[in-house]
Image: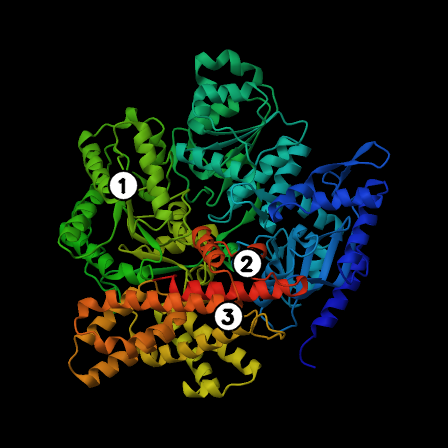
Amino acid sequence: MTTQPEQILEDNLVKQLQQLGHHQVQLPDENALLSNLKSQLAKHNNTEFSDAEFKQVLNHLNKGSVFDKAKILRDKMQINKDDGSSEYIAFINQKQWCKNEFQVAQQITMEGEYKNRYDVTLLINGLPLVQVELKRRGLELKEAFNQTNRYQRHSYGAGQALFNYIQLFVISNGVNTKYYANNRKQSFKQTFFWADKENRNITNLTKFADAFLEPCHLSKMITKYIVLHESDKILMVLRPYQYYATEAIADRVKKGVKNGYIWHTTGSGKTLTSFKASQIMMELPEVHKVVFVVDRRDLDYQTTKEFNHFSEGSVDGTDNTNNLVKQFTDDTKLIVTTIQKLNTAINGSRYQSRMENLVDKRIIFIFDECHRSQFGDTHKAITNFFQNKQMFGFTGTPIFADNASKNDLGKRTTKDLFDDCLHKYVITDAIKDQNVLRFAIEYVGRYKQKNSNNELDIDTDHLVEDIDTKELLESEKRLTKIADYIINNHDRKTHGKTFTGMMCVSSVETLIKYYDILQKKKEAGEHNLKVATIFSYTANEEDKDANGAYGEFEGAMVVEPVATYGNIHTREVLDHYIGDYNKMFGTSYSTKDSKSFYNYYNDISKKVKSKEIDILLVVNMFLTGFDSKTLNTLYVDKNLQYHGLIQAFSRTNRILDEKKSHGNIVCFRNLKKNTDDAILLFSNKEAKEVILVEPYEQHLDKFHEALEKLLYLAPTVESVDNIIREDEQLAFVKAFRNLMRIKHILHGFADYKEEDLDLTAQTFEDYKSKYLDINDKVKNDRGKDKTSILDDVDFELELIHRDEVNVAYILTLLAQICETPDEEKKMAQKKSIIDTLSGEVQLRSKKELIEKFIDQNLPHIKDSDQVTDEFDKFIEVEKQNAFTKLVEEEKLKADITEKVISDYLFTNRTPIQSDVVETFETKPKLLQRKKLAQRVTDKMMGFVETFISGM
């Protein structure tokens, strides 16, 4: 036997869980589950329930969504007892989390749309709160993840829906083990390894169970470290490094008054960590207030919004200093404010009488991005005013002696200001855990090897005099070459504008030149990129921030812009550019007052995130503190170093999906040494291999290795049809998927050429078509009374989907056929279109329809301009015929069926069973209802996919 069967894995885990303190219980079905819940809840609350009383409990528990149930779990319930009295019961003890009842069950069977048996379920006080799904060694962990998603869809809502109380999932194949919150919206990328304090992952199932599934720790994770995200109505669980950081801060507050800082790399979720730390400290009786301090007004707004997302109404934003002082003097426990307002509150004479009572109060300060804001007089003022304070800093890039900037108070490091580092999670840890992406850095310049698309005569290394260097760096000739490079390569870098880009330059003066060049080229029809910009309108000397020390980051000028206008000309230029933005998006922003400029700032932020802006042109703004998962490319024409470099590069490396494989950094200056120095400072000398994506040539070698494996399994496209056994089909799917992933990465390099692949574009498309045939077969077989090892395989169709290949595109190709007199060419064009339909995920459902139009209607169309109109008429007839066929075959009421489909199109929510049942002329019998309703729902979805979606 070469692999460990799932049953042995499961039995061993259950034995281990019993040794850890979970009591085994046999719960074959829902009746047993309910009976056990009744006894366990009674035991936990030291009471007894009559049948009528327990019915009240079940009615209370059977309310709402997964999110609502998570709230019910954490609340108490009032029960009306049979004798007329009432009592409160708790479903889980949150304060003394070890004092709960812990059980483990195997193979509980639930029947919803389909019958499902769950591997291992952990119950607390009788409620199923943790689901463990196991796969035999050698199988992909993602298959277990997909299986839990199926359970959520098919059976968790069945009966009393108790399985919707699941808080955490654990998935394992014995060798790799991960956990995640019960959140249907997340992807496999939001699953986490548990780790020790030094960030060493605990992947083995036995060791994971010891560390994570021990009853007290598991209960603590559920009661303390799951966050209910109010705005999205989802559950979030903290990752191990967030847990350890929060525990370290709470421990330090309980044991003394020493300060400390948390070094967690950019993009690792510091806001969630700081929120949870704030929340826990707020509950400590010895703490008077918790103050979360940011250094820019936009972060004040952003953090307040984020904190209220996590817990509604937890923060009341401090719009002005007077409001801040009011919060300091009332019963507000958690305050979010800017460092500027805090400074005014403690130094302003008008607030002195109200603030002086706080001098000796125990106040905890948490400073966000403490590498930026804590090195001026403000830090000194805060420490002098509050005598009983305790200060904690969060940073992704601490200040060390090597990257410290000098001010009037001298060179000071993060340790000088905040004492010890309480927990560390550096960029290499985050990349290893797949919490952030690696960087693919391309240096564009003359020092590139010959025959590279990145060879461009824009370098200044040969110049000595600073004045000559500056003159050349800002010369129109150089900037135009760079603008042309961006225009020619932006589509490739962003995968056809699936993502967005940002460009940072050395000064406002240079930014203005770039913007004007790009705008002129747009007006000349050389590109259609949507370019936006924002900068502070003070006079900029030559890049004061080029050393990477942002200091009082320029975004801070948004707080009090009137005092810093200075250069009217620069402000007028910005107003002109904002006018371009207003025309582009139908807005009406300006720099006339701080509110309008601030709203412009926020609108740009939203539009970058929603991919409405292709390139955002900046000097310093947005290079730190700005998170956008849809941003994948940074163009750099600026001397960055140390924390400034890592912060700027990190704008591109947020995790999104399979299509976003890394962050692109395109440098128009030779920043190689600066990059190496920054990586060395913030990780270690071996870290380059972890942080940086391998060059084009190495990925090409990987592609050829993957191609060799594919051709071994399927030497020709036709041979794929002869792969009958499911395990062989699975091997083909994995081999082609790997080839597809590597090709996707290669396509992002400027040096990418089709001929380098040793695989023609047509052959790749043909293999892709076979790959999609297998995907279609798996989809069509789902729900039948059979299980397949392909059921839970992720085909990663987002790597194939191309928005530009749609019905409108196909109609353009059909119009070209009408204009072609040569019959042989017509046949070739038709074949090309059919091949395209087979290879595009979003068009496969329409393939048969379009083929019919080509065969029956297209030969009679003489004028290519009539193709679209004729196709619309054809579709309308076919749609009506298909609808009539659906209604007649399934014996449905036409008007109600039409309404159900219309409601689906309006809400984008799959019709619920009761609505579908109403469409039947004769209501199905109870036992048949679920099966028939699902069949009709599937047909409705197919109808929409074929005749409406994408038309």
Which label number is shown at residue 263? none
Sequence-earlier tag: 1 or 3: 1
- Foreground residue among 866 and 206: 866
Q: Quadrant of residue 606?
A: top left
- Find numbered disc 3 in the image and state the secondary structure of the residue it sits on: helix
> Residues under labels 2 and 3: Cα distance?
15 Å
- Where disc 1 sits, the SS reads loop
- Distance Cα–Cα, label 2 vs label 1: 64 Å
Seen in the image, is 705 located left or right of residue 229?
A: left
> Looking at this view, is 869 or 594 the one in front?
869
> Percent from the top left, x then y, of residue 756?
31, 77
* Contact flag, marks 1 and 3 (Cβ < 8 Å): no
In the image, which is nearer the foreground, mark 2 or mark 3?
Answer: 3
Q: x, y (%) of residue 168?
A: 65, 53
- For residue 809, above or below residue 835: above
Give the residue number, with chain letter if any, for mark 2. Answer: 916
**Relative vertical location of residue 427 with respect to residue 936 in this rendering, above or below:** above
Whether residue 470 is visible, yes or no, is: no
Q: Secondary structure at mark 2?
A: helix
- Left/right of residue 701 with respect to residue 122 in the rendered view: left
Question: Of marks 2 and 3, which one's residue comes earlier in the chain?
Answer: 3
Circle 2/circle 1 CB separation < 8 Å = no
> Is 403 rendered above or below residue 490?
above
What kind of residue is marked 2? Val
Q: Quadrant of the N terminus?
A: bottom right
Which residue is identified by label 1? 543
Q: Residues within 10 Å of mark 1 (few under 14, many from 20)?
A: some
Placement of 835 over or under 357, stated as above or below: below
Q: Is residue 4 left or right of residue 634?
A: right
Q: Are marks 2 and 3 in contact (CB under 8 Å)?
A: no
Residue at image mark 3: 889
Gap in Å between the C-alphas at discs 1 and 3? 72 Å
